[in-house]
Image: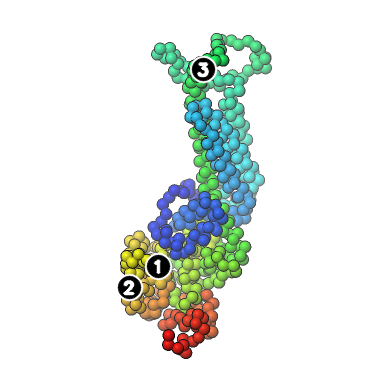
Amino acid sequence: MHPGQDFDLEGELPPGAADLIGDLELGTLLGAMAAGDEFLYDVAHKAVLGSLTEPSAIVYRQHVLADCLRRPAAVRAIYDIAVEAIAREKREYFSLFRSSPDAVLNRSVRVLELFMGQLRKLRNIADEHAGDFSSDGFTRFFAMLSKEFDDGFFSEVDSHLRELKFRRGILISAQVGKGNKGIHHVLRKLREQSWIERISAGRSGYSFQIADRDENGFRALSELQGRGINLVANALAQSTDHILSFFSMLRSELAFYVGCLNLHERLAGKGEPTCFPVPLADGQPALAAQGLYDACLALHVGGRVVGNDVDADGKRLVMITGANQGGKSTFLRSVGVAQLMMQCGMFTPAEEFRADVCHGVFTHYKREEDATMVSGKLVEELSRMSAVVDRITPGCMLLCNESFASTNEREGSEIARQIVCALLDRGIKVFFVTHLFDLAQRFYLERAANALFVRAQRQPDGARTFRMAGGEPLPTSHGEDVYQRIFGEDLDSAPAR
């Protein structure tokens, strides 16, 4: 996920994350990535909203994802190995009812044995598929597997695990302390015996036996054994935790790419195009796309959705007007979703896409009436915009959908104009969907050279193409088309109601 650090699954979400999810319908996108898996959803949720701001970091992740798209079976196999290792370790954890050193040691031996089996599977995949991957991320990963988990490593670990089962008994050394009590207990490695020594019945040194019913004797012997193996048990437990953290991080980082595979399969199955976008450094506003469509809408409908071409290079303001139900909100959503997908290193729902990176994406969409009647709609809109202004910084993007339409056109236009002008002067990119003709027309007259104006197309018979085209704002949104479709008659010839 990163060239020089681990993916932080516990990191905080950016400000306004809840509004982003609701306004851009990201729940649909995240659900497609998760495919019913709660862990995949959590990782996708964190990754998609945790935008990268360096083009090089985005390209690094794109290259890893490109490898995943070329070899999805191998990537899913690696992910399944990590998931299985974590699940099996958890079952062993719940089987540990005692915390004595021998119980900890026995449990750690079993866990390490199953971890070695999973690591061998990873090593086999590395040996078989390393040449199929070219990204820096996977190249370093497979090189690490080959170097750290070579045959000598597995042979040495297997030898230690056999020794720690103490099939030949336990050898412990100790010193005599105060009151003739043993101190400084140390577990010793048994000397390898020749075959003559193994078949010899005699033993050198002193020995004693505990009677079968001597419970205190067995308890004392168990305590002595525990003191001897305590250090080894703790060291082995730390080793299992270290390998477990490796599998946990492997699962977390691969979960994002598995989610991308799930989403790509859904979109490809519908015949929708995707591409790897070109991220540009911040500073000069840029956005250009061909065939850009709303991925969330594509996941909802049965057929293919309409894509749009857009060229907003050098434009900080994009004003979107046009016919009612002509696709303006869908186009706005497609821009926001594509920007987020690009900045988390994913493909984008378009034939081509390039844009400058933003330091944050914010939304200000119209809301339903306040059911609690605490405040009016205009007060609620202004309060939310105030919260956005408090958090937004230069280099960010703001998506507005019908903002300040809750008051009359003159007031709404003036409120929106002053806010948008202030945001533009601060170097913030603004996409604004509106029916307020006064607002759109004043910006067209004052800032036509530095802004892009697009309209939702309408055919002469009133049909909607759901495509955006450049053009001057019109004083009508063709609401009569909606009226005629619902009431079945022309607005001019309708009787007074």
- Of the two numbered discs 3 and 2 on the same chain, state the one appearing first in sequence: 3
Q: Where is residue 318 in the image (x, y as percent from the top left)?
A: 43, 72
Q: What element carries label 2?
A: helix
**Image location (x, y in percent) of residue 473:** 43, 80
Q: How many labels does the image show?
A: 3
Residue to which mark 3 is pinned: 215
State the mark number for residue 367: 1
The image quadrant of residue 423 is: bottom left
Q: How far apart are marks 3 and 2 (CA)?
A: 86 Å
Element carrying mark 3: helix
Which residue extends farthest front? 497
- Residue for point 58% across, 37% down: 115
Tag on residue 415? 2
Residue shown at 42%/59% (left/top)? 18
Quarter-of-image position of residue 201: top right
Horizontal side, residue 19 vs residue 213: left or right: left
x and y, in percent, of residue 249 in the image:
51, 45
Q: Is 431 above or below relative to 21?
A: below
